[in-house]
Image (cartoon, rainbow, N blue to C red):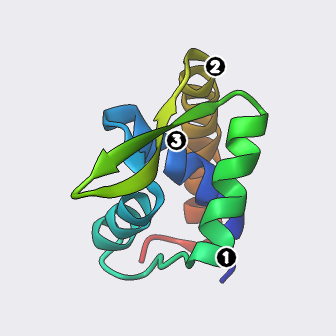
Amino acid sequence: MNFKGTLPTLILHALAHEQSHGYLIAQQIKERSQGVLDFKEGTLYPALHKLENEGLVESFESVENGRSRRYYRITKAGRVALAKDRAEWREISQAVTMILGKA
């Protein structure tokens, strides 16, 4: 299955809890999905840049262990979009469960 369309929502969810850099966002998604969702850099960073261009996240530079990293944090508009996405996801997942039956 292709879960690529869910990535922006998953990124916003990760950033709703704390600011982070791309690698940690990807690791958090992978860990919380028990390895089912494993987004690579080639997918993750374009999604982060798109979210930033849309004003849903903002980025800033920070030094960690002597290395400069780009961190991301959710904006107010991002929180609004996340709430909308969560509601839509619940509605869609309930409908699919009704059709396919409970696993």
Label 3 crowding class (10 Å Cα cut-off): few <14, some 14-19, many 20+? many
Please count the marks in the image: 3
Q: As shown in the figure, which amino acid type bears the numbered disc 2? A: Ala
Residue indicated by mark 2? 77
Residue indicated by mark 1? 42
Q: Secondary structure at mark 3?
A: helix
| Mark in front: 2 vs 1 | 1
Q: Is residue 3 visible?
A: no
- How far apart are the two marked residues, 1 and 3, measured between alpha carbons? 18 Å
For the residue pair 99 and 10, the one nearer the viewer reads as 10
Where residue 35 appears, as percent x and y from the top left, is 36, 82
- How far apart are the two marked residues, 2 and 1, measured between alpha carbons? 25 Å
Quadrant in which residue 46 is drawn: bottom right
Q: As shown in the figure, which amino acid type bears the numbered disc 3? A: Leu
Q: Residue at x 67, y 76 (%)?
A: 42
Picture layout, residue 64 above or below residue 37? above
Picture layout, residue 56 above or below residue 33? above
Which of disc 1 and disc 2 is earlier in sequence?
A: 1
Residue indicated by mark 3? 12
Q: Is residue 72 left or right of residue 49?
A: left
Picture layout, residue 71 above or below residue 27? above
